[in-house]
Amino acid sequence: MHTALRERMPGLWPFVPAGYPDLSTTRELLLRMADLPIRGVELGFPFSDPIADGPVIQRAFSAALASGLRVADVLTMVAAVRSALPYPILAMVSASIVYRIGLGAFAEQAAVAGLDGLIVPDLSLEEAPGIAAHLRTAGLALSMLVAPTTPSDRQRAIAAVTTGFLYYVSVQGTTGERNHLPADLAVRVASLRAATSLPVLVGFGISRPEQVREVCRVANGAIVGSAIVHRMADMAALSPSLSVVEPTITLVRELAEAVV
């Protein structure tokens, strides 16, 4: 497990959809992000029916899958660049992918590739100990999600099985850009942080530098996905022959430097 996962210094965690618009772009983005003041990366493994992702990320996943992308391709790419990356990488992956490959096999393959842990958004609390045990054996973290509607006793149970950071979902529904953060965000995050020694990161609805700054005042980090993928999609639509890397890195830098 990467030492940065145990640290509480706030900062940006950008979400990158693996294989969109192609795997070479993902590789270049990961390498370029090594020069930015980010805390880590959430690497999305494309899935045909993501339950928590809004239309922007769903379209990126669909495009990656249509190109024939496989889990093994993503792991091979990560392994090729891992030594050049100073930050932790957590895979955002559906439980169905993990179960299809096998708990032990997926954990071993993820560790060999150089991943530092998993975020499994469709994993139930009841199933979590099984995956957590395999990940712990492989030296990987499991970051679990907590929603605004999660009762306090269930929050504690989720924290007990979590070995990375707690992922606080700031709004109900799917991922996507929003103009305003929830008015009660600071209170809810403070309550969660008081109940656990784990770092608490906030995701869903964060899209602008000022929102990243606001979140990092009360939490241990901000996860931004849809705004980044939206920038990639806009650039790809303008000209398929032009790389989306530079404008994407510009946005990630702006978001990350809001905390510095």
Image (spheres, helix red, strand yellow):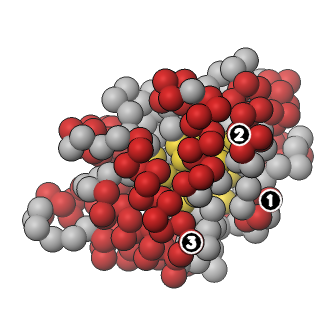
Per the image, the residue denoted by label 2 is 135
Query: In the image, residue 133 lies at what x, y percent?
Result: 77, 32
Instruction: Determine the secondary structure under disc 1.
Output: helix
Compare marks 2 and 3 and give the one earlier in the sequence. Answer: 3
Q: In this view, does 14 lie above or below 194?
A: below
Precedes in sequence: disc 1 or disc 2? 1
* Residue at mark 3: 83
On the picture, is 177 further left or further right than 145?
left
Instruction: Identify residue type, mark 3.
Output: Ser
Labels 3, 1: front one = 3
Residue 84 x, y percent position in the rendering:
53, 75
Q: Do the residues labelled 2 and 3 touch (CB within 8 Å)?
A: no
Residue that appears at 85% across and 34% down: 160
Q: Which residue is drawn at 48% across and 59% down?
A: 78
Mark 3 Cα-neighbour bin, 10 Å: few <14, some 14–19, many ≥20: few
Whether residue 202 sits left or right of residue 73 in the image: it is right
**Residue 56 appears left or right of 96:** left
Return the mark for residue 6.
Answer: 1
Query: Which numbered disc flags the more N-terminal residue, 3 or 1?
Result: 1
Q: In which quarter of the image is residue 158?
A: top right
Residue sitting at 37 percent across and 26 percent down? 49
